[in-house]
Image (tube, helix red, strand yellow):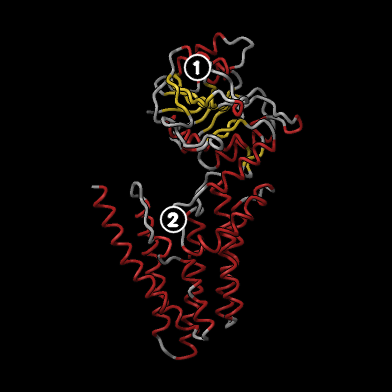
Amino acid sequence: MAFAALIAAYQEAEDGAAGLRAMLPMAGRSLLEHQVRRAIEAGASHAVVLVERVPAELSAALDRLKRDGIAVRLARDPMDAADHFHPEEAVLLVADGLVAAPDCFEAMAARTAPTILVVADTPDNTEFERVDASHRWAGLALTTVESVAATAQMLGEWDLQSTLMRRIVQGGADFLPVDGDAGVVVDASEAVLLAEGKDDSRDAGHTMLRRNSVQVESWPERFLYGPIAIRVAPMLLDRRLDAIWLRGFAILLTAAGAAAIWMTWLWTGLILLLLAGPIDAIAGRIDLAQLRDYEGSWELRAVRGFAQATAMLAMGSLAWAETGEAAYPVMAIMAILLLVLARRASVQIRKFPNFESRLMPWLADGNAAIWLIIPFAAAALWYYWPIAVVIYAYITLILQQNIIREGVRNRD
């Protein structure tokens, strides 16, 4: 079902100095950006943000969303908001200050209007608005454009999101519980939250960062970089450090490591190559918390991959110069080509529905290939590293083809 998002962004935060609830800090960005990205990720075609005033930070947040190709518009009053929707699309109302798990957005996107997301009327949920004797509104409601327009016409001085929610309920809406046997998640304690101040939104961002998981991680990312990234990323999020700067620094370190190997500074080059890994992983965690691609844009992946390939070519060239054996640079080139093929196969595997394989973290990629240097460096057998990568990548390709065949068979 086609739908768009209507996001309320006009209520003041509990902490007056924080301004609007929509501008509360959330994973290094604003709560509004998080809400828009969650809605778009769930399938919304575009988002309309209902505001009464447009502070500079809100305008900057919208500009960041638009730079990422997200269709988002401002509406200064309810009638203006209604005019931004197509008559045949459903409207997902997102409450001001709502932080909701992706499961909640996806579950609402799969429903038909009218539907509202609810939590039980318990002492733990008093911040949510009461719907009836046993339910409170959990901040998401699916309705029609006609209902939005009709509510806008009769609003007067009433609050849009509360009035619209009431009209949806009066229209015989289905109740979708957040938790319970028929609910979206098992435990609602961290699934929905109404952030009223900076502490609420910041804590929610940190919780989301801890709970977010990467679909496929190489073993260095899972066992070495991951524990570092989980501890460091929240501190950098609070300082609003953009992940692209960390990715750029990781690329710089990788390139410097390759250059050091060309100049026969082998240990220096190895240390620089190893340091680049956790920095890129921290950037990935920040991007994941901000609902971007964990691995970054394809351009950044290509540049870092080229820098890693240069390091391997440098080792092959150095071995050729020292031994006179042309097999070393040939092996380095073969290792690079096999890693590229393994990367393409990995992307293909991720497209399978409900994909899961215990083998995937142990398969070869750029990070795993770099860490494979260590035993050869310890044994003073540096030049054999590209040969080991060729064997590792070739075995990886064989295993990947088996996984692909199994995935195609399960899909069919």
Residue 148's disc number: 1
In terms of sequence position, does the residue under pointer 1 or pointer 2 come before the other?
1
Q: Residues within 10 Å of mark 2 (few under 14, many from 20)?
A: some
Residue at 55% x, 79% y is 262
x%, y% of residue 384? 45, 82
x%, y% of residue 1? 37, 28
Residue at 55% x, 23% y is 121
Q: Nearer the viewer, mark 1 or mark 2?
A: 2
Residue at 58% x, 23% y is 75
x%, y% of residue 249? 61, 61
Q: Are marks 1 and 2 in contact (CB under 8 Å)?
A: no
Write down the quadrant of residue 108 in the picture.
top left
Q: Residues within 10 Å of mark 1 (few under 14, many from 20)?
A: many
Q: Secondary structure at mark 1?
A: helix
Q: Considering depth in this image, is 411 or 385 the residue closer to the camera?
A: 411
Q: Considering depth in this image, is 71 or 340 the residue closer to the camera?
A: 340
Amino acid identity at mark 2: Val
* Outermost residue, right side: 17
Q: Considering depth in this image, is 131 or 343 the residue closer to the camera?
A: 131
Task: Specify whether 327 is left or right of 228.
Answer: left
Q: Secondary structure at mark 2?
A: loop
Residue 216's disc number: 2
Task: Specify whether 55 is left or right of 411.
Answer: right
